[in-house]
Image: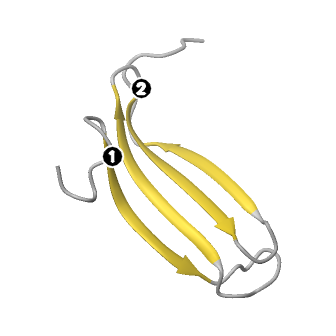
Amino acid sequence: MDNNDLSFHGKVLYTGIEKCPPVCGRDSLHVIEILYNDPAFGDLILYSNQCDYCGYRRVDIHYLNSRGGLSG
């Protein structure tokens, strides 16, 4: 496995440090985006942001496709 492999199902798309626009505006926001394949839900992109300076945190999931799931 290379350094971008998280497991059998996930791969890091992007990681970096960016400006924290929501709160402090400093270049201290750690950003990671992971492409993850879930057997039940299909492809997902997992986003995680955390600022070392002000403590701002955010996580999000975007579904790229769906394999079944809830019906309604």
SS state under label 2: loop
Q: Is residue 2 left or right of residue 10?
A: left
> For mark 2, does the 10 Å Cα neighbourhood hold few (<14), some (14 to 19), or many (20 or more) residues?
some
* Residue at the (17%, 49%) spot, across then down: 1
Q: Is residue 46 left or right of residue 1?
A: right
Residue type of the residue flagged with mark 1: Leu
Q: Which residue is mark 1?
A: 6
SS state under label 1: loop
Q: Is residue 65 left or right of residue 57?
A: left
Residue type of the residue flagged with mark 2: Phe
Query: Above or below — where is 57 with respect to 46?
Result: below
* Residue at the (67%, 64%) spot, across then down: 50
Instruction: Give residue 5's position: percent from left, percent from top.
Output: 26, 50
Q: Is residue 18 left or right of residue 1?
A: right
Q: Which residue is mark 2?
A: 41
* Residue at the (54%, 11%) spot, across then down: 71
Q: Using the rendered view, name the quadrant where residue 3 is placed.
A: bottom left
> For mark 1, does the 10 Å Cα neighbourhood hold few (<14), some (14 to 19), or many (20 or more) residues?
some
Instruction: Give residue 7's position: percent from left, percent from top.
Output: 30, 39
